[in-house]
Image (cartoon, rainbow, N blue to C red):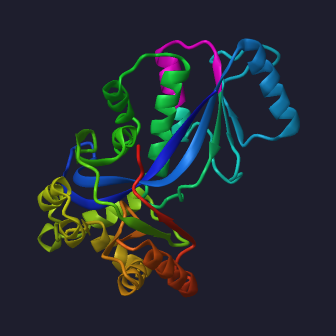
Amino acid sequence: MITKKAYGKVNLGLDITGRREDGYHLVRMVMQSVDIFDTLTFERLTHNEIITDENSIKNSGSANTVSGEAADGGIAEKPPIIITATNDPSLSLGEDNLIYKAARLLMDRFNIADGVRISLTKEIPIAAGMAGGSSDCAATLKGINELFELGLSEEELRDIGVTLGADVPYCIMGGTALSEGIGEILTRLPDIPKVTFLIAKPEFGISTKEAYGAFDSIPEADVKHPDIDGMVEAVRSGNLSGITDRLGNVLEQASIPAHPQIEEIKKIMGENGAEAALMSGSGPTVFGIFTDTDRAWAALERLQESELAAELFVAGPAQV
């Protein structure tokens, strides 16, 4: 059995520089892993274990889903991918889930005969702009690679990952990084100075498609682009004020008018000790950067009183 942590991320900077003919947006982003993570365990299933496991699940109804093509009383034409969620029975874990897609892609490509049981413990908020699905996908690629001893390098996994999602290559790398292209061009950056993040996820979600679609309706002349080059230089020099002064996300310009709660959360964080606050990714999650952990916890209490956030976390940068 193999266990992998799938870390969430925040965007210290997010700029959109264009759009490809296939619809993908060209981006420049400074990404940062945070110490909020889903946990995935991977267990190899032999043919006999596949039959026993499938029958057990069908009889007990204990799994969210059993994915794979199973033949009654026999071995599946393709080895099954059995996914369960230990703490959120509402999750959809069918063939549209990135965990399933990642596992199936590698198992088909390498003609793996055995099946796999994957157990997910979810902590990263869903539809939050924190790359929870992409991070689970990245952890699955790494877990299947290790479980079945495929010998793929990180670079090879990243090349595969970008076919599944633009954030997946970064989630395979983790840490602090500049992400360009559609997310596949990565430059590792030094760790940022020690800080505490307060992370607030409102009750509602924003899909990536919704966020980017709303941004596309803004005339280019009205777009305020963040200083990504300055952010990268500040990270490289360990200049925290240079980082916080340059926090920026072009998607806020579309998301905040539609969801003013985002701006309200940012304001409360700023009034309660945050050096700066920003919407992460496609939103609606907001993160604040604090140099004093006690002040981060005090701001969390203020946000609890406001009832603007459904989920709140205090966390540091992840050590990946």
Q: Specify the quadrant that holds the N terminus.
A: top right
Q: Is residue 75 visible?
A: yes
Determine whether 211 is above or below 22 in the image: below
Whole-percent x, y for residue 234 in the image? 16, 60
Quadrant in which residue 48 is drawn: top right
Q: Which residues are magenta?
A: 102-116
User: Does the magenta-highlighted stretch encompass residue 121?
Assistant: no
Q: Is residue 284 visible?
A: no
Image check: 50 left or right of 83? right
Determine whether 125 is above or below 247 in the image: above
Quadrant in which residue 3 is drawn: top right
Residue drawn at x 20%, y 58% is 238
Residue drawn at x 34%, y 32% is 158
Image check: 143 left or right of 290? right
Whole-percent x, y for residue 291 in the image? 35, 71
**Closest to the observer, 284 or 254:** 284
Residue drawn at x 47%, y 54% is 35
